[in-house]
């Protein structure tokens, strides 16, 4: 049998999703750079770091949501609309600096906004003003990862292959 536990299924799915998104990001970036629609990133390592932090956030959230579906069908039903709402508030469609100070403080509670801001700073350098707290994002990802692993462990006792 290929999969022996819940964590095997979830990690396989996470690797596939991260690989697909990364491949798409690289191919589109290279295409747009080659045709002249986009310049090279200002700091490629910072772009990779921001992308890695976003992947960690996504992987930890996937562990939590994926294992949570073993306990309740409501998790799966609620996740789809929530995931559609996450894009507009992720920071990908707006810059934190564009927002009034009060709203900046609110959106910076979302860990993924910090990852997008890191990526943005790596791409545009000092030509844009970014707002992020790496420690905050790392702590959120760590807590989500630990919670996700705990739920995966609990779910593995409920799911049979």
Image (spheres, rainbow, N blue to C red):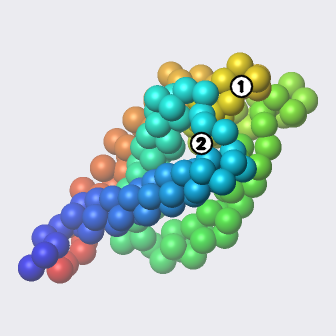
Q: Which residue does the numbered mark 2 point to in the structure image?
A: 112
Lateral position of residue 121 relative to residue 161, left or right: right
Which quadrant does the C terminus fall into? bottom left
| Residue at image coords 59%, 42% | 112
Q: How many marks?
A: 2
Q: Which residue does the numbered mark 1 point to in the structure image?
A: 130
Q: Secondary structure at mark 2?
A: helix
Residue 20's tag is none
Image quadrant where residue 128 sits:
top right
| Residue at image coords 50%, 22% | 135
| Residue at image coords 78%, 33% | 96
Q: Residues within 10 Å of mark 1 (few under 14, many from 20)?
A: many
Q: Report x, y in % for residue 34.
A: 60, 51
- Find out whether the residues at labels 1 and 2 contact each other: C-beta distance under 8 Å: no
Q: Secondary structure at mark 1?
A: loop
Q: Measured along the vertical axis of the image, is residue 48 above or below residue 131?
A: below
Q: Report x, y in % for residue 142.
A: 40, 35
Would residue 144 be seen by someone viewing this image from the given angle? no
Q: Report x, y in % for residue 131.
A: 70, 25
The answer to which of 48 and 6 lies nearer the viewer is: 48
Lateral position of residue 88 relative to residue 15, left or right: right
Give the farthest residue toward the right.
100
Would residue 133 be seen by someone viewing this image from the given angle? yes
Q: Measured along the vertical axis of the image, is residue 70 above or below residue 28?
A: below
The answer to which of 39 and 147 lies nearer the viewer is: 39
Q: Earlier in the sequence, mark 1 or mark 2?
A: 2
Report the Cα–Cα distance between label 1 and label 2.
14 Å
């Amino acid at each position: 049998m290929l999969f022996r536990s819940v964590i095997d299924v979830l990690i396989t799915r996470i690797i596939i999703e991260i690989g697909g998104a990364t491949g798409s990001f690289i191919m589109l970036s290279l295409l747009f750079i080659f045709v002249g629609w986009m310049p090279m990133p200002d700091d490629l390592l910072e772009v990779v770091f921001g992308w890695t932090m976003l992947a960690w956030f996504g992987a930890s959230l996937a562990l939590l949501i994926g294992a949570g579906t073993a306990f309740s069908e409501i998790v799966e039903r609620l996740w789809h609309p929530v995931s559609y709402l996450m894009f507009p508030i992720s920071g990908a469609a707006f810059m934190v600096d564009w927002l009034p100070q009060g709203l900046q403080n609110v959106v910076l509670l979302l860990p993924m906004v910090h990852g997008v801001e890191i990526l943005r700073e790596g791409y545009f350098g000092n030509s844009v003003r970014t707002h992020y707290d790496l420690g905050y994002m790392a702590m959120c990802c760590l807590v989500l990862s630990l919670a996700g692993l705990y739920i995966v462990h609990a779910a593995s006792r409920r799911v049979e292959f």
